[in-house]
Amino acid sequence: MNDRSTLRMKATDTSCAVQGRVRWAPGRSLWIGGMTLAALAVAPFHVTIGSVLLFLVTSGITLCAGHSVGLHRLLIHRSFVAPRWLERLLVYLGTLVGMAGPLGMVRLHDMRDWAQRQSACHPLHAHRAPPWRDAWWQMHCRLDLDHPPRFVPEPYLRDDRFLRWLEASWMAQQLPWALLFWSIGGLPWLVWGVPVRVAVGVIGHWLVGHITHRTGPAGWVIDGAAVQGHDLPAAALLTFGEAWHGNHHAFPESARLGILPGQHDPGWWLLLALRRIGWVSALNEPAHLPPRAGLRRVGVGAVAQERMA
């Protein structure tokens, strides 16, 4: 099975996911470094009930509706259908998380996904470095492969003026909100509404990715892939379902990440609510998808399947 994220990467016989050099990325590094420094230096001295509530609400909206549903499940994997106005709203909210612009997010995701599907890949794409080095690599550096595949986005990505505008201005998108928060709640609202939210969102995204590509429960294995996905059940609610990463590796085009009973997936719950009011449709689930080559059920689920056979 080939999902959209693999089709955008045009590999040749010389494409290699192993050989490359990790280089410092000044723009990304100064961005997340500045946000983290501001959060650590200012936020502890400006804590109010309103500012913390603002942080929680804005983080929940941007991470769940924006990053998980808008950027990941819709823009990257096209795992459901939404009208253009809703897609743009969700992608805009995802851009406010502060990781990258929408096209940059697609490219970063697709390059990592392509590399992890190879028989071997660079330690950066596999999250194999120790935590502090991996954090530096993922948030402050870039990997320049010697022979990378070409990134060829579809016209709906390449030619969309709204997406190109967001890509060119993704950092500046925080400014209107910073001014609004400042005007309403002063410095506490400003620091908790922007730098704390951005720093926690980006660092948390790295941490979950680091863990779920290294260890934890694994319900599925893809034979021949350099990197397997693992689940992090304790973080399922905090990540709005993204912590079911083993499920996502198995069924990347599924809009539902928590696919088994008891696997909490707030992003899926949001999609069900949107479907109920007629705003989204064609929500993919694993049963709707063709079998993925090399996919095997392992662990408790495999034992259960054998007993039922």
Image: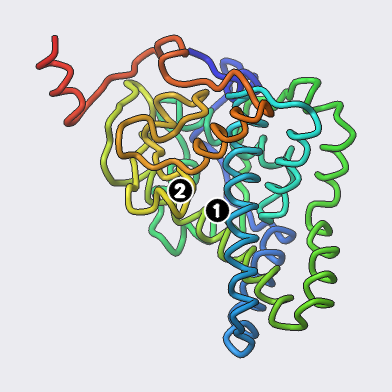
Question: Percent x, y for residue 211?
Answer: 37, 51
Q: Is residue 306 left or right of residue 66?
A: left
Residue 90 vertical placement versus 210 (above, below): above
Which amino acid type is marked by label 2?
Gly
Residue identified by numbered label 2: 209
Q: How many marks?
A: 2
Q: Residues within 10 Å of mark 2 (few under 14, many from 20)?
A: many
Left or right of residue 298, residue 35 in this image: right
State the CA–CA distance, disc 2 to disc 1.
Answer: 10 Å
Q: Position of residue 159 (x, y in %)?
A: 86, 26
Q: Which mark is residue 281?
A: none
Task: Indicate the position of residue 127 as horizontal and vertical percent values.
Answer: 43, 47
For the view shown, which residue lies furthest in the left direction? 307
Q: Nearer the viewer, mark 2 or mark 1?
A: 2
- SS of the residue under disc 1: helix
When the figure is inspected, residue 191 is found, relative to residue 176, above or below; the finding is below
- Residue at image coords 72%, 41%: 91
Residue beneath label 1, please? 138
- In the rendered image of this protein, does residue 257 appear above or below residue 233? above
Q: Name the foreground residue: 203 vs 151.
A: 203
- In the rendered image, the quadrant that contains the C terminus is top left
Using the rendered view, name the quadrant where residue 197 is placed: bottom right
Q: Is residue 73 left or right of residue 167?
A: left
Mark 2 vs 1: CB contact within 8 A: yes
SS assignment at label 2: helix
**Residue that appears at 28% across and 45% down:** 216
Q: Using the image as rendered, state which of residue 23 and residue 282 is in the foreground.
A: 282
Given the image, on which type of amino acid does mark 1 rest? Answer: Gln
Percent position (x, y) of residue 117? Answer: 45, 26
Residue drawn at x 69%, y 82% as measured from the top left: 188
The residue nearer to you, when weighing 125 against 175, is 175
- Nearer-N-terminus badge (2/1): 1
